[in-house]
Every structure is written in C-alpha cells, then in structure tokens.
Image (cartoon, rainbow, N blue to C red):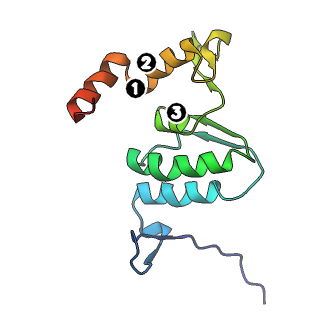
Amino acid sequence: MQLPDTMAIELNVTHGGRDAIFRPIDHLSTGQQCTAVLHLLLLDNQDPLILDQPEDNLDNAFIAERIVAELRRAKLSRQFLFATHNANIPVFGDAEWIGVLSVEGNKGMILPEQQGAIDVPKVQELAADILEGGKSAFNQRREKYGFN
C-alpha cells in the first residue's frame, strides 16, 4: 500500500501565556495565513530569500514587533531581498542596502544614485518619500499621534 505525501500547516492563534490553540491554515484569515507562511520562510535556513511585498495582509505592529526581529536575527547568516512599501522592514530591519526602483517607459532600473545604506542622504530622502509619503506626511502623522 502506498500512502500519499501529506502536509498540514497549523498556526497557534492564542496570544500571551494562554494555552495554545492551533487552527488549520485553511481556517485562518488571509493575514493569519500570510503570518504562518512567512514564519516558515524565515525559519533557520542558509538559502537567500526573495519576497515581493511580504507585508501584504499583515498589520504594521506585527511587522515591527515580530517580523523585523526575526529578520534582524536571520540576516546574520542569510541574505534577503524584499520589494516593499513598508518602512518598518528596511528601516527597523537595518537593511544593509536599499535600492529604489525607477521606471522609464516599460523598463525598470535601479540607478546608482538611488541605492545604498539608509544613511546615504539621497537614499534617505527617497525612502522617506516612498515609504513614508514624504517628510510632511511623516511629520503630520507624528503630530496627530502626539509624538514630539
């Protein structure tokens, strides 16, 4: 008798110190499914990981508190290349390199002056414009939240 290979993914949906409750991936919300798969992709591994917008369907608090912490730990032994519109990933994740994609006609490119570390002034300016909506938008959010 030959049995088919099967795999089941379940996610612990409890928070804090409560007893764990695991739910099958097909009974989870889209955000919970993304969380489960992203955690699997970030497990100990030496292979490079390329992801397009890993933040989709995840809330910013979860990205800042959990995903970024995993990235910072894993980047010591693994290379990541992410296309993202979420500032938490490259900024809090201490990205070694940021490249800003430009489009001319139907050709995408990363120009030499639009890449480097976050402490490169032009990269800093572009990151703020694209990821935060610009300095004005960032300052308006800071004021609305009462952060001084």
Residue type indicated by callout 3: Val
Residue type indicated by callout 1: Glu
Give the residue number, with chain letter if any, for mark 2: 129
Residue 12's place in the image compared with 50, above or below, is: below
Give the crowd class for mark 3: few <14, some 14-19, many >=20 residues within 10 Å: some
The answer to whether one can see residue 107 in this image is no
Kindly give the residue lying farthest to the front in the view shown.
148
Q: Is residue 82 left or right of 34 when viewed as pictured? A: right
Label 2: state its secondary structure: helix
Give the residue number, with chain letter if any, for mark 3: 91
The first of marks 1 and 3 along the sequence is 3
The answer to whether one can see residue 88 in this image is yes
Q: Quadrant of residue 28?
A: bottom left
Residue found at x 42% / y 54% = 31
Label 1: state its secondary structure: helix
Label 3: state its secondary structure: helix
Residue found at x 56% / y 70% = 9
| Front-lying residue, 99 or 4 | 99
